[in-house]
């Protein structure tokens, strides 16, 4: 396995083309996060790509017959959106067809699965290959790569099997090669990895040109992980611990707990560590230290997927909103009923003060990171937390805006930046000639209000009108 392998996987994924009809969208305003706003444009789509873009006053070559013409007057064309943090196998009762329909219906034309056992993901992968014309693009990490005491091993309620465990006795090179052979395009590390194993994983990933994102192992200092080539972080997890004025002492205490002398389950040990350190760390936040770390994240190009929708699970409580619960109607019956019942029960509880603290802390942190130039990626963690696939991404965009990002920056986080994470930004994420034709026609201008991404007129995926 070498650099070429990843490039081949990615180009295969991107060229999963469908020889659809040719299409022209006329008189439309083009909005992407790279170019200035372009008014009155005609966009010609052929073989899944944007073939030409001309001002609508110039007629698109008349002898070149188009199968379909869409009038874009008063509408806005944006690149298809990404949800860059999903778990397709977390709730087995939600089938892949339901997921893919909900993503496309909501304008999400690319997804990144951030943790799934390959064999369990395989039916989704097969379905995508067989039905490219009605599915989003899928990029996946394969399993969470965890340590000896792994968290998601399918043995405790709420912790399905999503991971593999590696330690100093594992042949990590073989593990990574095996994942590459199964089509992964990045890796996801998890919290119970030992420091030594994690550092070795980062090195092997680097050799294979794979970015490692995920939860920073509890055994390592964040700055050391950045220096060792960390590629990305999820949920701004570990920033709490790293930004505490007592960060070094907290790390020493964590390492002692991680020895796990009482041999408790990994999931319980992980929860125990977070509950003993998270709010203490936030209470003892050291702003200067934190800024130094954030600047380091920016300088090292470490991507952040804050998943504000899941970080604010206890404070925003989408599940307590009747309108939100209406989105459950698209889920399989058993899950719909379960979510409705559990949502109502949960909604009766008061909001805990810690949830409000974590909410504010998460949004403030995203704001500072964005201002300091850290690359922010939009992702949700759906279907965890009653976050309905597709609909939840738009909530994430609203939260990123509320945190302080501009509408254009939010748009970037769900189009160009996830593509940059995979080094495919020359293929996808902007509206330019030659780019892949994953596009949304919106009724309102998303730069005026990010909520306008919810007012979708037409979704075009792989050059095909959905
Ligand atoms: Zn996740």
Image (spheres, rainbow, N blue to C red):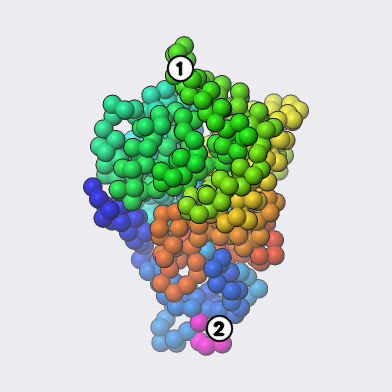
Q: Which residue is mark 2?
A: 56
Taking 198 as reference, is 330 left or right?
right
Q: Residues within 10 Å of mark 2 (few under 14, many from 20)?
A: some
Q: Is residue 292 magenta?
A: no
> From which residue to which does the magenta span run?
54-59
Depth check: give the residue in front, 299 or 13.
Answer: 299
Q: In the figure, 173 relative to 24: above or below?
A: above
- Residue 425 falls in image quadrant: bottom left
Depth check: give the residue in front, 447 or 26.
Answer: 447
Depth check: give the residue in front, 386 or 238.
Answer: 238
Mark 1 secondary-structure assignment = loop
Q: CA distance from mark 1 to mark 2?
A: 67 Å
Depth check: give the residue in front, 284 or 322.
Answer: 284
- Residue 271 falls in image quadrant: top right
Q: Main secondary structure of the magenta part?
A: loop
Disc marking residue 78: none
Count every numbered label the image shows and give the total: 2
Q: Position of residue 352 (x, y in %)?
A: 73, 29
Q: Which residue is mark 1?
A: 260
Q: In the figure, 228 relative to 421: above or below?
A: above
Residue visible at 59% across and 77% down in the picture: 38
Residue visible at 36% across and 32% down in the picture: 197
């Amino acid at each position: 396995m070498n650099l070429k392998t990843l490039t081949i996987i990615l180009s295969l994924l991107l060229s999963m083309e469908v020889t659809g009809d040719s299409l022209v969208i006329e008189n439309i305003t083009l909005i992407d996060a790279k170019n200035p706003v372009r008014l009155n444009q005609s966009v010609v789509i052929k073989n899944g790509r944007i073939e030409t873009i001309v001002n609508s006053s110039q007629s698109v070559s008349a002898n070149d017959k188009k199968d379909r013409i869409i009038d874009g007057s008063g509408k806005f064309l944006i690149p298809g959106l990404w949800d860059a943090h999903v778990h397709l196998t977390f709730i087995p009762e939600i089938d892949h067809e339901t997921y893919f329909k909900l993503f496309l219906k909501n304008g999400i034309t690319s997804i990144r699965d951030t943790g799934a056992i390959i064999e369990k993901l395989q039916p989704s992968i097969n379905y995508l290959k067989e039905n490219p014309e009605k599915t989003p693009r899928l990029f996946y990490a394969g399993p969470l790569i965890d340590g000896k005491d792994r968290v998601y091993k399918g043995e405790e309620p709420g912790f399905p099997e999503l991971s593999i465990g590696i330690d100093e006795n594992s042949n990590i090179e073989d593990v990574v090669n095996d994942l590459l052979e199964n089509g992964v395009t990045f890796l996801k590390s998890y919290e119970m990895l030992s420091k030594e194993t994690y550092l070795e994983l980062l090195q092997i990933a680097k050799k294979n040109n794979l970015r490692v994102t995920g939860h920073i192992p509890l055994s390592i200092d964040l700055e050391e992980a950045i220096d060792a080539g960390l590629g990305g972080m999820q949920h701004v997890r570990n920033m709490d611990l790293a930004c505490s004025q007592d960060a070094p002492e907290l790390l020493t205490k964590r390492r002692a707990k991680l020895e796990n002398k009482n041999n408790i389950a990994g999931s319980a040990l992980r929860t125990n560590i977070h509950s003993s350190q998270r709010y203490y760390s936030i209470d003892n936040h050291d702003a200067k230290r934190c800024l130094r770390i954030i600047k380091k994240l920016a300088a090292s190009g470490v991507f952040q997927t804050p998943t504000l929708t899941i970080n604010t699970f206890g404070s925003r409580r989408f599940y307590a909103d009747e309108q939100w619960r209406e989105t459950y109607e698209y889920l399989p019956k058993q899950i719909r009923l379960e979510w409705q019942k559990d949502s109502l029960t949960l909604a009766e509880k008061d909001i805990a003060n810690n949830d409000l603290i974590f909410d504010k802390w998460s949004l403030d942190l995203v704001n500072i990171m964005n201002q300091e130039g850290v690359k922010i990626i939009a992702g949700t963690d759906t279907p965890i937390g009653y976050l309905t696939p597709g609909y939840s991404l738009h909530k994430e965009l609203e939260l990123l805006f509320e945190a302080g990002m501009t509408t254009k920056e939010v748009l970037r986080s769900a189009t160009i930046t996830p593509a940059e994470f995979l080094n495919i930004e020359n293929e996808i994420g902007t509206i330019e000639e030659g780019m892949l034709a994953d596009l949304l026609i919106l009724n309102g201008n998303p730069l005026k209000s990010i909520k306008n991404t919810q007012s979708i007129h037409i979704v075009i995926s792989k050059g095909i009108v959905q």
